[in-house]
Every structure is written in structure tokens, then in C-alpha cells.
Image (cartoon, coloured by chain):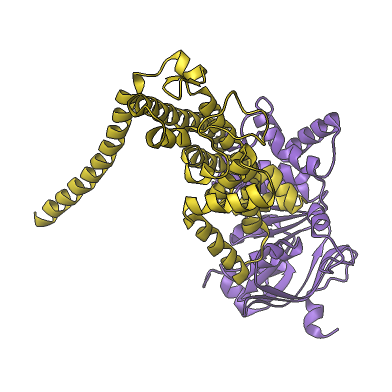
Chain colours: A yellow, B purple
Amino acid sequence: MKKDFTQKIGFSLISLSILITLLFLFIIIYFIFIRGIKIISLEFLTQSPRNAMTEGGVAPAILGTFYLTLGAIIFALPLGLACAIYINEYSPKSYILNIIRLSINNLAGVPSVVFGLFGLAVFVKYFKFGVSILSGSLTLGILVLPVIISSSQEALLAIPQSLREASLALGATKWQTIKNIVLPYALPGILTGVILSIGRVAGETAPILFTAAAFYIKGYPKSIFSEVMALPYHIYALMTEGTHPYKQKEIAYGCCLILLCLVLLVSTIAIVIRQKQKKQYYG
Amino acid sequence: MDNKENKNCFCSQDLIKIKTENINFFYGKQRVLKNINLDILANKITAIIGPSGCGKTTFIRLLNRMHELTPNITLTGRIYLDGQDILSPSVNSVEIRRRIGMVFQKPNPFPKSIFKNISYGLEINGIKNKEFIEERVIESLKNAALWDEVKNRLYDNALKLSGGQQQRLCIARALAVKPEVLLFDEPCASLDPISTRKIEELMLELKKDYTIVVVTHNMQQAARVSDYTGFFLMGELIEFDTTKNIFEAPKNPKTEDYITGKFG
């Protein structure tokens, strides 16, 4: 009897933890939705800001966030995937590998504002890319590299060794095996990493603070060397600068809602693709 | 040549396909194969029997250099395929594995269509001609006695097949690249008796065109299908002879104890 009772208490506590977690998520979404929905309109989504940020829309910021995220993934996905392939499939198991692993894990722990300063020093100043989409994308890319590497590694590890052996036993080279058997099979797992990265990149403010973002730009970015507006930075700027705090606050909540929806949308698309892939590969 | 070496060689007219000389193999410091000298004859089925952990799987994985995938190993000795030393660094393991195919303990089809599973081996070897590939796929499926069961669903995912069908698909996949030798590593370990019988019949059919080595811990299987049998124990080749002699008149008491079921 006593054991049963203890177990019940244990289960209740665990369920409660989940409830509390979900509650916070729900409150955040609810709060942002209620405050942000008022301002959302077709004009808000498609127009540029007007009248010193108090009217008009945030289309350039949406587009800017899209460019920065896309740029970061384009940069980080091939690089991170290649690192994961090297670590898992090629590198001999040695202490150097452990050092590499440790370094990548450390990279994941670096505060994002440090990446921002690094981007400013290296991409903006040293390589003379200026404050631009390119600098911002590269900085964000480095920020998410560890996420992509570790999730790709997990995806590669999950592939049964027997499949690699089957391919090699037919006279395939290591590279043919990786390209034709390992990577397609690992794709759902790799996509998971990309989803996580997109969520992370789209919402980061500190890394683009000095490398890409501008409070206001007339018109849309013309090339990868242009400064851009971006949603997270736009929110930050609206709340801290400007001369019409009340009007700006409303717009800021609208931006929050859009950012949230964008990330959810991208995640959903990626999850759908992943499910389709899984069906294809796991029968 | 000393006596011990001579024992396992055959001076008949049969062609020696694979010859292993003084094979010693170590995982780290642990010696798992000790002085193995064994000849595998062309167009015969050679069975390797022995209790779990005796080194029989380790042994056949050497024959197509699959052991190279395992880190921290040491191998000494020579393995000759048609007289060519295949362990020499100048020999490409990719080429050896194309000539010596392998079927594994657990069926391991690729998570692709039945057709793609078989065409894969051809495509990686640079064959592009679609008609040729299609003909070879059909031929391989027929030779693996699977054609009638799958001819109407060649583009279904191979994972939908039953275990026995998957294993025959793996055999078809190995046949498609036209190897000279086929290695079977306990091919029926995870199959039911009916599927097992089909695979055994298939092996007997295939020995016309291929040299076959089969590792099994099912002694009845060795007795049913093989022409020659080698008995491994604790990393040593205890006895190697015709299957008839091994099962009816073993020379070594350890062999007799094993095949009569006293241990193992």
C-alpha cells in the first residue's frame, strides 16, 4: 500500500511538471497573440514603416529575417554536415577526435553576444563585408554550427552499421556509401537539426546587432552587402528607441507574433517533410 | 611444408579459389585467430562451423577485407585469391569486395525499392545502360529464386518483404555484380525453417557458378549443403576435411565432441 501511494505521488509530481511547462508556453503564446493580433493586417505585413516607425508595416524586417536565416543555413548546413560526416565516418577514433568534439561542444556554449562581437571584428572589419546581410548570415551561421553538427552526428549514428557494410560489400567506396546510403537515410534526422537551427537563428538579436541589422532603411535590401532590418532587432529597437513609445509598443507585439508564426510555420513544414522521408525510408 | 600445413591442402584436380596462409588476427591484444591455413575450392561449398566466439565470423570477414572497418586490429599472414595476395596494400579492397560478395547474418536490404536494391551494385560500378541494368536485375532475382514472388511489385520498398524474402533479396543483390565468391555469414540465423530450406536449396543451385563459403552454427545445415567443412574452436582450425569425413569419421576428438553435441 505504501509503495503504491509513493508511486502515485511521484506520477502526480511528474504530470504537474509537464502541466507547468505547457502552461508557460500557453501563456506566452496567448499573451503575444492578444497583444499582437490587433495590429496585424495586410498592410502591416506588406508595407514599409512610415511616420518615424509609428505607422505602416514591417515587411522589410520580415524579409530581412528571412534573408539572414536563409543565409545562415546555406552557410552552416553544408559545413556542419561535412564536419559531422568527417567525425562519424572518416576520422580515426583518437584523442584528437575527442578534442574536436569538446571544441564543438564549447562552441555551443559561447554567449551569442560574443559571436556578435566576433562577427563585427572579423566579417565586418577584417574581411570588409561591412554591416551587411553577408556578415550577419555568417555570424548566425557560426552560432548554429554546433547545433547542426551535433544533430547531424546523431542522425548518422542512428544508421545501422549493417547498411554501410551491405554497400561496402558490393564494392562501393566509402564515399559512394555515404552519398547513396547513409545520407538519404539520415536526412530526416538532419532536417531536425535544420528546424532547430532555423528557430534559433530567426530569433537571435545579439549576433546581428553589430553585423547586419539597421533600425530603419528606406526600401528593401539590394544585395548581400546591404544592411537589413530584422524582426528581433526591430522589436528591440521599437522598445528602446524612438519618440512614440505607445504606438511603437503595439508594433513590437505585432512583430513578436509574426516572428513566432514564422518559426512555427517553418518548423511545421520541416516536420511534414521529415515525416514523409521517414515513411519512405522506414517502410 | 610441414605436416600441419599439409593437412588442409588438397592435391586433387580441384582448383583452389582462396588460399589462406598462417592467418593470425588480434582485436587489440586479444588473439582471436591462430595460425589458420585453409584452402577454399572453386565451385564447392565450404562450411565453417564452431561454437559462438570461435572466430568463424571473424575469419570470413577477412576474406573480403571487411575486417578493415573495425578499428584497433592486427592481422598477419596471407590470403590469396586466384594466387593474388589480396592483403597487399597495393590491392584495392573495393575491387576485392566486388569479386567476393557477402550475405550477412541479418537481412540488411537498403530502405529502397526492390529494384533499386539490386541495381545499386551496378550503378556504383559505373553501369548506366538502363536496359542492361533491368535485365541484370531480373536475372539476379530469378537466380535468387525470388522473381516469382516480387515480379509484380519491383518498386515496393524492400522492407515490406518477409525476413526470408529479404535475405534472398540480399543474395540477389550480391549476385547482380557477378562476384566469383559468395560469403554467407550465418545466413539463416534469423529465418524460419521454410525460408532456411529455400536458402539452402539456393546455395546448392548457386555453387555451379560460384565458390561459396558459409559460416553456420547449425551443424545440420553444414551437413546438408557443404562439400567441405572446417571446425573452429577458440580461434583455431581444429579440423578441415570433406563434410562426409567430418561428420562420419572425425579424426580429432574435439570435432567429434562438437558434432555429437557434447558441447557448443
- Residue A200: in sight, yes or no? yes
Q: Position of residue A42 (x, y in %)?
A: 46, 14
Asked whether, in this view, residue A123 is left or right of residue A249, the answer is right
**Going by the image, does B106 lie left or right of B205?**
left
Q: Nearer the viewer, residue A167 or B231?
A: A167
Picture quarter with the C terminus of chain A: top right
Q: Position of residue A279 (x, y in %)?
A: 54, 33
For this rendering, which residue is in front, A91 or A66? A66
B145, A233: nearer the viewer = A233
Placement of the N terminus of chain A among the 4 image quadrants: bottom left
Residue B191 in view here: no
- Is B22 located above or below residue A63 in the figure? below
In the rendered view, would you say A26 is above or below B12? above
Seen in the image, is A278 located left or right of residue A34? Answer: right
Give the residue at the far front of this rendering. Answer: A243
Rendered residue at 48%/51% (across/down):
A113
